[in-house]
Amino acid sequence: MEIVTQDADARRALQQELERFHCRVHQPDDPPLFTREPRPDMQSLHWRWCDLAPLLDRLGREVDLGAGGPRRTLRLHNPGLPYGTTHTFWASIQVILPGEVATCHRHTANALRFIMQGEGAWTTVDGEQYPMNEGDLVLTPAWGWHDHVHRGSAPMIWLDVLDISLMRMLRATFFDPYERDVQEVDAVPDRTWRQFGSGVMQPPGAKPAANSNPLLAYPAAMAQAALQAAAGLAPDPHDDVVLEYRNPTNGGPAMTTLAQQLQLIRPAFRGRRRRHTGSKLYYVLRGQGSSTVGDQRFDWSAGDFFTVAPWAWHAHEGRGTEDALLFQVNDLPTMKALGYYREELA
């Protein structure tokens, strides 16, 4: 102990001198740089639709989308973090009313929209325009000009997810407003869908930019039909029936930093536990079920959201009488690209 004390005193004395040269030496009271396993700041949380619905109604009535600045969104904030839903991405619920325009801009953050309720809105990304209807997934790749116009007759609600926390961490933030509220639409507004939308066929000479996904829209009917077909296969021991949205040109994830999955959990399913680096957000489209995350149990139903923190043991099970349908966003592509992905299976 005496040696430790003498060393500690020496380190403190040395640090005073080192500060003159903007240098440091480890101090006894410094937090550890390495731990035996991850110690995430983010919490695993459960947001219930019965709590969110009245907040969204109030947001639509009291917040003006045309006031400039950020969109009209309800952020799913994680109290363990200074900002964001997980340590790498933000999730928020956007409300847009008939006739409204979410004006055009671009930013370095990757973004996705998953339509929760309603129909009649259109998104335009770099001149391509696609409908936004319930259950659709639409993408806004980094630095793409984008705007949204609601031409329907009833309010719409969708989930926005952006890798803002990762972008800010890497000090890669850029943002530009467009010169007008909306951009011009191309003569062939669904060009990349016509080229790559089948998922299995494409023009022989088509060459999208390296590591980019040319697809901007994944319609609900296509995704859910594929999931129902996969239900005839042996169940995944952890997720029952699960498919990932993919880049049709290289088979990789639909986005470079975030992955999206659609998952069916049947009433009799009891999943095995697992844990891994990276974080997840789930949105429940329909049905009921339960998920244990660490020492917590989330009994979820339609409209709910819940997160899974990095390295937290988690498992799912079905409840009720109908199949549950969930949409998932995770940051595993980032973890795998950096070589930091690791998992353990129970």
Image (tube, helix red, strand yellow):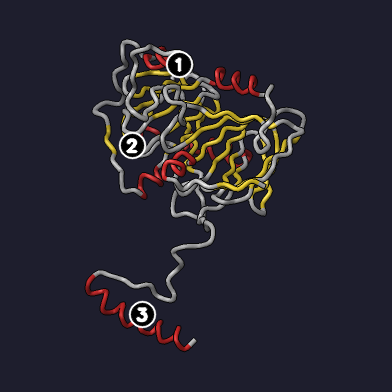
Dot 3 lies on which element?
helix
Q: Nearer the viewer, mark 3 or mark 2?
A: 3
Residue contact between numbered discs 3 and 2, judged by CB atoms under 8 Å: no
Q: How many tags in the picture?
A: 3
Q: The residue under label 3 is which amino acid type?
A: Arg
Q: Position of residue 335 (x, y in %)?
A: 46, 44
Instruction: Check disc 1 and report the residue beneath it.
Output: 197
Seen in the picture, residue 265 relative to 228 is either above or below; the reply is: below
Q: CA distance from mark 3 to mark 2?
A: 52 Å
Image quadrant in which you'd find residue 26? bottom left
Is residue 149 visible in the rendered image? The answer is no
Residue contact between numbered discs 1 and 3, judged by CB atoms under 8 Å: no
Residue 9 numbered tag: none
Circle 3: is it few (<14), some (14-19), or many (20+) Cα within 10 Å? Answer: some
Q: The residue under label 2 is which amino acid type?
A: Gly
Tell me: 24 left or right of 234.
left
In this orientation, which residue lies closer to the viewer: 60 or 21?
Answer: 21
Instruction: Check disc 3 and report the residue beneath it.
Output: 11
Dot 1 lies on which element?
loop
